[in-house]
Amino acid sequence: MSTSALQTLGASPSCLLPPILLVEDNPADVDLTLRAFARRRFANPVQVARDGEEALAWLPRWQAGEALPLVILLDLKLPRVSGLDVLRAFKAHPLCRSVPVVILTTSSDNGDIRMAYDLGANSYIVKPVDFVKFMEVAAHIELYWGVLNRQP
């Protein structure tokens, strides 16, 4: 796996905060998410996987001791391996099954929503197209998953 394939954005060696894993194939949506978090001054580093295969490549890295993410933001419509298959694999793996997975996608299909929750998603958010609305979503993600939620 090349370094350019999996980017760690905003991380420093001394960073003690757990990362957020963003699994998103659309460069514009990656940029929008990163800008929203930067504007919110979100302190956690954001790691980006640009397709389902790159997302699954984190499993052996976590087994090798890399920090588990605080939360995984997962798009459903991914190339190579679908978001639902990534979700299924993450929730089936003993090491990361307790990591919250927030579906962040353009799909408002009831079947996708039902399947995501059946597979263990912790939340399902339909991406707003407007930047201001997306900033609100980023603020809610930061507040709930970064401050209020307590994990084992």
Image (cartoon, helix red, strand yellow):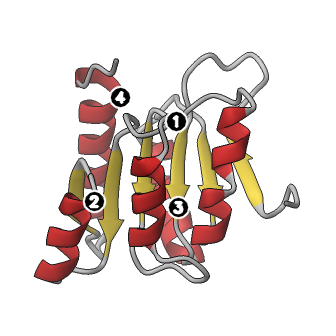
Residue 84 x/y as whole percent: 38, 70
Tell which circle, 3 or 4, labels the residue nearer the N-terminal end: 3
Residue 80 x/y as whole percent: 61, 81
Amino acid at circle 3? Val
Residue at screen point 26% across, 52% down: 120
Tell which circle, 4 or 2, labels the residue nearer the N-terminal end: 2
Q: What is the tally of numbered marks visible in this picture? A: 4
Q: Secondary structure at mark 4?
A: helix
What's the CA distance linking mark 3 and mark 4? 18 Å
Q: Residues within 10 Å of mark 4 (few under 14, many from 20)?
A: some
Residue at screen point 26% across, 80% down: 107
Residue 23 numbered tag: 3
The label nearer to you, 3 versus 2, is: 2
Left of 20 or right of it: where is 143? Answer: left
Amino acid at circle 2? Leu
What's the CA distance linking mark 3 and mark 2? 17 Å
**Relative to 37, residue 112 above or below:** below
Amino acid at circle 4? Gly
Tell me whether circle 3 and circle 4 mark residues in contact (CB < 8 Å): no
Tell which circle, 4 or 1, labels the residue nearer the N-terminal end: 1
Residue topped by disc 2: 119
Amino acid at circle 1? Pro
What's the CA distance linking mark 3 and mark 1? 12 Å
The label nearer to you, 4 versus 1, is: 1
What's the CA distance linking mark 4 and mark 2? 23 Å
Left of 39 or right of it: where is 3? Answer: right
Residue topped by disc 4: 146
Q: Is residue 41 visible?
A: yes
Residue 69 numbered tag: 1
Tell which circle, 1 or 2, labels the residue nearer the N-terminal end: 1
Residue 111 x/y as whole percent: 16, 81
What's the CA distance linking mark 4 and mark 1? 11 Å
